[in-house]
Amino acid sequence: MSKKVNRRSFLNFAVKGGLGLMVGSSFMAPRSSKAANPLRILNANTFSGPYAEAGMLGTRGIHLAVDHFGGKILGRPIEIIDRDVPNPAEGVRKATEGIERFGCEYIVVSPSSDTVLAVMGYVAKAKKAVMYAGAASDKITGEACNRYTFRLVTPCWGGIREVVPRIIQEYKANTFYTITPKYVFGEDLLRNTKEVLEQRGKKLLGNSYHPPGETEYSPYITKAMAAKPDCVLFLNFGGDTVNSLKQADNFGLKKVCKIGVVWGADVTQLQAIGARVLEDIIFGIEFFYKIDSPLNNKLNKAYREKYGKVTSFTAAAAYAAVYHYLEVVEKAGTTDPRKVIETWEGFETEGLTGRETWRACDHQCIRNFYTLKCKAPKDMKHEEDFADIIGYSKHYLPCEQTGCKMSW
Amino acid sequence: MTNLILAQCFNGLSLGIIYVIVAMSLTIVWGLMNILNFAHGLFFGLGAYFAYTVVTVTGNFWLCLIIVPLATGLVGLILEYSLLRRLYGLHVLYQILLTFGIALVGREIIILIYGPIGKSFYPPSILEGAISIGGILFPKYRIFLLFVGILLIFGMWMFLEKTKYGSIVRAGTEDSEMVSCLGVNISKVFFLIFGLAIAIAGFSGALVAPIRAIEPTMGWLILGICFAVVVIGGMGSFVGAIIGGLIAGLSQSLVTLIMPSASIIVIYLAMVFILLVKPRGLMGIRD
């Protein structure tokens, strides 16, 4: 039996429907009308799973950068949209949502190289936003480069050329064994490590690949010890490094050879490993809170006041990604992607590591990479004083060798 | 090369023991209660976090080996009483949905309480370092792990084979309805056995915590392998869990010598092979 539509039911429906539309529309950001709308920045990071820490720390850095600009740029309030991107497919989906639905004009993507590369492809086609690539694969400013993407972190080529020679010099090591995760980043680290060792006449006795996310390293450590190298180099990252170093300590690896970690993640990683295991290990790292520069000192002070901790690299990189974008926007006088890009190319500024330049040919920020030596627990002045900086330098492939060819 | 193979065999055994401990508790729940517990890995991780808490507060690793199984067991009992028992007799999809949901919620609760940043603590000083025998290094902690694992397995075997309660559990694994018809309070059996199984899972997490990163997703990584172990050994089979766990540990360790990238895949390949050749598993119980 059909229901008759009468005045009462019609009014009932209209009120409920109207209320529903009002509530629903409040969740949908209007298309950008730049004069009225905020500048939206998409924070595409991992907020769940094994790399959830990256999302938390990156978000802190981004918010501090926005705070340091007073929450506004060119008279427009700044709004951050956080999205979880645990894999490349989600990365592209969320980037599409950010640009098409929310009108985001800047996208900060990290930490996976695979996700960054996938989103880069989309951003280059969309041509509506500028992107920051928070990953270290050589391809990002190499053959996969595009005009819409900028990168702060040092690529593998440069980082290895700071830390491996430093390890050779510190340890006086002649023979090496490497333990490498089998994915894009690990392969880049291994290739570059082999090149540096060969250039310096040092011998690589062997390499063990492991799957990323491996939890059991006993077979790889046993193989490494059987090869009897002067130094075992761990080319893994994040949780893989934590697991492998703890188990290496359990096997007594430090008693038979030296240990180097070519790509440390963060001070939080050092915390997860623990000072006793870390003692005397050399780490290569993008950033350490002890860097003495005006911007880093400013960031350190703000971070400690707000979070009670020293600044982690993940937070610092995200801070720099947004801080320098806002500097460029201020200089360009607009958020128009093309004008921002043209202003950013060749931009020189006081960065976290001192004077930094954003190279025009591949959009790579030219900055220092650092080597740390970890302290004995008794030498630590506070609970986060795990290491001291023992060296730093800048190494970047010349423009003509990067393989990067950019166009609009 | 012989030394390397022997060393890998030892590593494989110590790794396999962990798989055995987690898998035997999983197979008891699966075999007796017919519950496909996707939250089992969560309790492994919870055990590691509880161990971290106890060691941080008391500085005593030995104490955590007593407190952790009691604490995780209690969590298991609460979950069984409040949620799981509503699923008995229902379609397996409901079990998967609920236990998977518990696993996801549990992981996020761990992140909320402990943070996403990994934790760490070390083995007691008496278990640090390694012993060299014939040029092969045996970490003391892994020898301890092997020893404790064997003791636990023996204890469980004694419980299942030599006690009245164990015979109820074994009978229930074959036919829980008949056990119920014979006047045994099967709900109480399920309640206590689930608590015991979760206590064992938590205990295994505490055992590996000193030599692994304690992070929120550590349970997921072991869960997949332990499901494969249970399938290889046979659902509900205690002996099957032992054989399956040791096969998994040894194959993972030895395959690393030839093809490290295949070290985990080989466990799943073994599972596929067993499913094709002997679907009930190596020691699975025939209907």
Image (spheres, coloured by chain):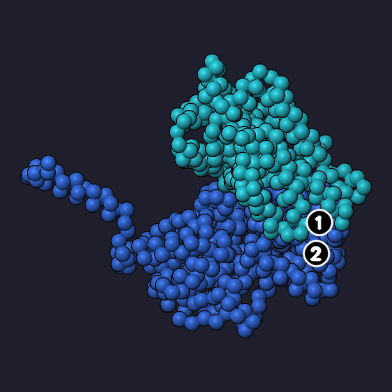
Chain colours: A blue, B cyan
Q: Residue at x 59, y 28 (%)?
A: B174
Locate residue A235, reporting x and y percent.
71, 61
Q: Earlier in the sequence, mark 1 or mark 2?
A: 2
Q: Amino acid at mark 1?
A: Lys
Calculate the distance from the C-alpha at mark 1 to the C-alpha at mark 2. 9 Å
Which dot marks residue A223?
1
1 and 2 marks in contact (CB < 8 Å): yes
Q: Residue at x 49, y 40 (%)?
A: B96
Could you confirm whether marks 1 and 2 are on the same chain? yes
Q: Residues within 10 Å of mark 2 (few under 14, many from 20)?
A: some
Q: Quadrant of residue A16?
A: top left
Locate residue B135, reporting x and y percent.
91, 50
Q: How many marks?
A: 2
Placement of the N terminus of chain A among the 4 image quadrants = top left
Q: Residues within 10 Å of mark 1 (few under 14, many from 20)?
A: many
Locate residue A171, reporting x and y percent.
83, 62
Is residue A306 positioned above or below A71 on the image? above
Q: Residue furthest left?
A: A7
Which residue matches tag 2? A206
Q: Amino acid at mark 2?
A: Gly
Is residue B35 positioned above or below A270 on the image? above
